[in-house]
Structures are given as C-alpha cells and as structure tokens.
Image (cartoon, rainbow, N blue to C red):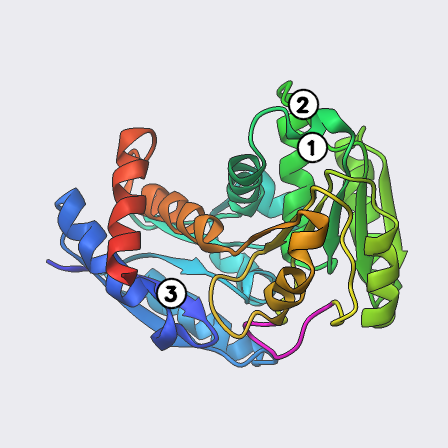
C-alpha cells in the first residue's frame, strides 16, 4: 500500500517538495506520496484538528510535516497526540507528526534543523571573532533557533557573543525570555521592540563585525515586504540569512544592494529547507538520513530545481 505523507502549509502546491519528495522516495526505496493541505494564516482551529484526525484515522497516512502552522496545530489538537517530544513541549509547537501503530507522536525539530543550517552557513569557528546573532522576528522560528544555539553551546560548540531578537510585540519577546530562563540560557539575550523597518535598521547598524542577521519572519514568503528597509546597513564581514527559500525575498535584495561595500554574504533558506524536510522524513519513515545519505538527498533536491 502506498503511504501518504501530509504537508501542512500556506501554498503547498508551489513548494519545491512537490518535485523533490517523489525523487527522494525513489532513492530510499519507499512507496509514499506527498499530499498538501493549505491553511490560511488565520485558519480556524477546527480545520487543523480535522486534518490531524484524518492522519490518525487513515491507515495509509503515516505522518506530516508542518510549516507555518506549528503553534496552531498543537493548540488545536494537543489532546490527539499520545506523546510529545521535549522540544514540542518547550516550544509549544509541532513540526512533525509521526504514527507508530495506533499512537500519534508530535515532535518539534526546528531547534535542531536551524542549528545545523546555522553551523553550515557560518562554518567552524565563525563566532570566535566576537560577532552577534540578530534574529528578526520573535515567532516560532526565532524561538527554535535560540533553543538550537543553546543546545549547541551546551554540547561545547562555539556560540555568538550575544543573541538579539527584534519584534513589534513585547508579548512575543516576553515568551522568548521565558523560554531562555527555563532552559538556563547562558548566552546574553537582548530582546528589542522594533516597531517598524527603520527601527530594525537601527539595531542592525549597532552590530559588531562578523555578525549574522536572520530574517526569521514570514515576510518575503507568506506575506510581502521585509523586516528591514532599503536603507539597511550591515556591519563588515557579516552574513544576511533569509530563512525563506522562495518568494519575493525582498530582505535578500536589500542586503545584496550594499553587500559589496560591507563584505556582506547573502544566504537564502535552501539548506535550512532541506535540513527541515530530511529530518521530518527520517522521523516519519524511520530511516537514517545523515552523512552521505543526507548529501545524496541534498544533491537530488538541487537537481530537481535545476
């Protein structure tokens, strides 16, 4: 029987994974199809709950990857899960649903995948120069990234001198601070209310060289615009990383506009996208996707986009 792997998103039909997933399944020797479900950003809880119940009740359904709606899905369907992993409980979200017999398991994997992507783009020893990490937006992506950086530091890996996080809402920043306190974050955390793009630009301008600025908002993908303005100025030898791999990505265009003078490296979200998907595929299908297997699947994904 062909299994069904579900994908909860906003515009799933436009995702590169529609082309990539069948190639991955062929490579792994697995008979499975990808089916997307689109939810509006303000979708009612009933829709999320019905989608999780469908996975639970359908024998062919083996799990799901959840993108934009991680918090909303757990809020709407927490009681439908038999088990949540530690990250799901800490982050109050699920990015992965996996069935084990008649048990429904929920996991949040973004702390691990964001850490892998961050280390991949920065390289070993990047933080030795004293740079800082600036996360634009205090939503789920930023919270997961802070947790991932914390766990990497706990494992003895290098870490930024400071983590700054901007948001338009003080409430979101307070949630992030609460998480940092609960895990014992030892990296200095500086939450900053930035009401508009000009205020965000001002924060970017105060960063030391060798810093990394991350667009962790949905701006440029799920909704138009950028958290920065055309006048943003990056510190020397910095990295501008957009977690989005598709869409207008105005954030990247703004960074490229002055990248040469500041020696700013501009990186899109492609590697983060591949890490995110392979981790969920590995959990749902119970296969090892690491080392050479990950490299092979990353190459397959890139070839599908050529």
Q: Position of residue 296 (x, y in %)?
A: 25, 40
Total of numbered circles in the picture?
Answer: 3
Farthest residue in the top direction? 156
For image coordinates 60% across by 63% down, the residue present is: 252
- The residue nearer to you, when weighing 152 against 303, is 303
**Residue bearing the label numbered 2:** 154
Tag 3: Cα neighbours inside 10 Å, few (<14), some, or many (≥20)? many
- The residue nearer to you, when weighing 241 against 57, is 241
For image coordinates 32% across by 62% down, the residue present is: 17
Tag 1: Cα neighbours inside 10 Å, few (<14), some, or many (≥20)? many
Asked if labels 2 and 1 touch by Cβ distance under 8 angstroms, the answer is yes
C-alpha span from label 1 to label 2:
6 Å
**Residue bearing the label numbered 3:** 7
Numbered label attached to residue 150: 1
Residue 226 to residue 189: above or below? below
> Could you tell which of marks 3 and 2 lies nearer the N-terminus?
3
Q: Nearer the viewer, mark 3 or mark 2?
A: 2
In this rendering, would 293 be left or right of 127? left
Q: Give the range drawn in magenta.
A: 220-227
For image coordinates 65% across by 53% down, the residue present is: 260
Q: Where is residue 286 in the image (x, y as percent from the top left)?
A: 29, 39
Label 2: which secondary element: helix
Q: In which quarter of the image is the N terminus?
A: bottom left
């Amino acid at each position: 029987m062909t299994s069904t792997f579900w994908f909860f998103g906003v515009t799933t039909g436009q995702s590169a994974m529609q082309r990539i997933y069948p190639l991955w399944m062929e490579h792994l020797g697995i008979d499975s199809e990808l089916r997307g479900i689109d939810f509006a950003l303000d979708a009612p809880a009933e829709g999320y709950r019905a989608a999780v119940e469908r996975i639970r009740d359908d024998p062919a359904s083996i799990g799901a990857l959840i993108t934009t709606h991680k918090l909303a899905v757990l809020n709407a369907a927490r009681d439908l899960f038999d088990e949540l992993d530690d990250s799901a409980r800490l982050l109050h979200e699920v990015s992965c649903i996996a069935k084990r017999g008649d048990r429904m398991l929920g996991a949040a994997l973004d702390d691990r995948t964001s850490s892998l992507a961050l280390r991949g783009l920065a390289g070993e020893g990047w933080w030795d120069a004293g740079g800082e990490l600036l996360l634009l937006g205090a939503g789920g992506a930023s919270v997961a990234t802070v947790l991932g950086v914390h766990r990497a530091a706990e494992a003895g890996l290098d870490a930024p001198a400071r983590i700054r996080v901007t948001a338009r809402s003080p409430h979101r920043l307070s949630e992030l601070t609460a998480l940092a306190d609960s895990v014992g974050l030892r990296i200095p955390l500086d939450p900053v209310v930035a009401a508009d793009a000009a205020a965000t630009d001002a924060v970017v301008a105060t960063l030391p060289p060798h810093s990394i600025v991350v667009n962790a908002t949905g701006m440029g993908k799920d909704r138009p615009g950028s958290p920065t303005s055309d006048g943003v100025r990056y510190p020397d030898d910095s990295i501008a990383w957009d977690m989005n791999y598709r869409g207008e990505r105005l954030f990247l265009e703004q960074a490229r506009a002055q990248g040469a003078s500041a020696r700013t490296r501009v990186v899109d979200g492609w590697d983060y996208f591949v890490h995110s998907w392979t981790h969920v595929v590995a959990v749902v299908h119970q296969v090892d996707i690491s080392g050479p297997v990950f490299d092979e699947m990353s190459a397959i994904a890139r070839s599908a986009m050529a």
